[in-house]
Amino acid sequence: MAKIELNNVVADFPIYGTQPSLRNALFGRVVGGVVRRQSDSSSRVVVRALENVSLTVNHGDQLGIIGHNGAGKSTMLRVFAGIYEPSQGSISIEGRVSPLFNSSPGLSLDDTGYENIVTCGLLLGMSRDEIERKTPEIEEFCELNDYLSLPVRTYSSGMLVRLGFAIATSIDPEILLLDEELGTGDARFAARAAKRVDSLIGRSSIMVLASHSEDLIRKMCNRAILLDHGRVVLDGPTDEVLEIYSRANKDEAANIAPPPQDTEQTELGVPLASRVG
Amino acid sequence: MANRSVGGRRYQVCVKTNGPMMQGTLALRIPHRGPTRSSYRVALVDIFAGIGAVNIWGRLGWRETKRRYRRTAFGPFWTTVGLALFVTTLGFVWTNLWHRDPKVYLPYLTAGMVCWVMFSTICTEGCLSLIVNEQLLKQLRISYTLLACTNVWRNAVLFLHNLTIFALVFLYAGLSVTWATLLIIPGFALFCINAVWISLVLGTLCARFRDVQQLVITLLQISMFLTPIFWTPDQLTGRTAIVAQVNPLYHLIAIIRDPLLGHAPEASSWFALVAMAIVGWMLTIYMLAKIRQRIIYWI
């Protein structure tokens, strides 16, 4: 049974670029107590990405994460994957995690599609035999045909997503984590992806999708949370959360003229040019 | 908030590994205030899961080597060509300058340089091993030791490339293979055991302090001259002789160079490498236990 439990999770990002690194540390060491008190956490630049998040994701949940840019969606996914360990609070993750964020893990642009299937598969915890057995299934799902023998460099961003999604879902993950990248697939692919996730949920358990695309979330999720400044503001069935979210957005847009343009917002089927590579 | 006061000192970390990734079942109670039993456990899992994933670091390192061949005729052999030029030129100048027998000096210099190149590349690339893998590290919870192993393995493959120069010199000098040559196997293994922790520590330090790589490069340049590579330890007499013996880099090189030249490494070299491995790995475990949780935020 897969399960994710977050208890009062805080994620702080220390920002180091703003100060001289080694010199600062050495200097602090030499001068000792006096400076250290000032240079302690109080003056260090920290970005708080998640603030006291408590959340339980259960078996069967298809969770959509929505929120503005910088609301903490990607951080949340990475906490789910066990990548970012919280600065405070506790997490507990049960189950085999398969992530699909910017690209597949270990993807090398110089290698061919087939080579990448092996590398990514190994990194995701498959054995060579398992990968060999799954390869036809991956081929079939991503529909890249001969492209699989070409270096991944030649793929369009949509094709990369197709390959990545096929690999990420082939390992029978118990927890499938998807970032908004999925939005770069075309409409046909989105429908196929939704179907595949459905069948996965039947077999395994949890899917989490962070996206700006309300359509995609509506299609693939049965539960949604709204993040704002690292806090969970809303948590409930997809339709309700999306309705409140879009109403709030409309109100905001009405108050500000001209309406702000969300640059990252993308319609389904329109590739995000800036995301290539 | 009540939770925090309870969780302040009590840790309950349980990681059941599933392959190379440190996932499966994961429960973490934070904050860390220093190494605890559970954080030591996480550190050990990182190390053993990383080293154990032979198929993964084997493939990653191999792919990276193969990529260097892509669209070039000689690929990594260009390093070998450069090294060959360096060794022949230097060998020619110094055998004349110091009136040494080229058939003795040239194999010594070549074997030493080939080992040194491997060691120094492991160090400089080890510094970057976490930083350049940012993409991967932010997609999977993965063992840092795995990346250090990849680095060492990749450079071991390059070492084999470079060994072709030594093979030529070996033939030229008319050296012969002896039983002591076999000692290269345990010697090389000991070298790698040390190289992995060195790479891991440097990679971690560099993730936090980006100056470290420049520092390492500078120090390596100086140590190349302080380490008996161009000169032999017996050229130092009296008090200065100790310079070679206390230099750990000398032993790291000698443990591979001596078997290559057909004689057994000194007992002090074996001792030094075993001691380095024990102390080094203990430090590494302590370091990981203390800061593993924070590394990902530095990258």
Image (cartoon, rainbow, N blue to C red):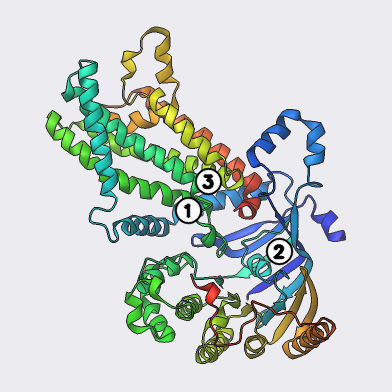
Judging by the rendered image, the residue that carries numbered circle 1 is: B146
The residue at which mark 3 appears reads as B203
Chain designation of label 2 = A
Kindly check if marks 2 and 3 are in contact, taking CB atoms under 8 A apart as contact: no
Looking at the picture, does residue B187 appear above or below residue B34?
above
Q: Position of residue B248 (x, y in %)?
A: 44, 27
Residue for point 36% across, 46% down: B155
Q: Which mark identifies residue A85?
A: none
> What residue is shown with label 2?
A91
Is the residue at mark 2 from the same chain as the one at mark 3?
no
Which one is nearer the viewer's eye here, B244 or A110?
A110
Q: Could you say which is closer to the camera, residue A237 or residue A150?
A: A150
Residue at image point 50% right, 50% down: B145
Q: Amino acid at mark 1?
A: Leu
Residue type at mark 2 is Ile
Chain of the residue that carries numbered disc 1 in the rendered image: B
Dot 3: within a 10 Å radius of its alpha carbon, few (fewer than 14), some, or many (20 or more) residues?
Answer: many
Return the disc, 3 or 1, that comes first in the chain's sequence. 1
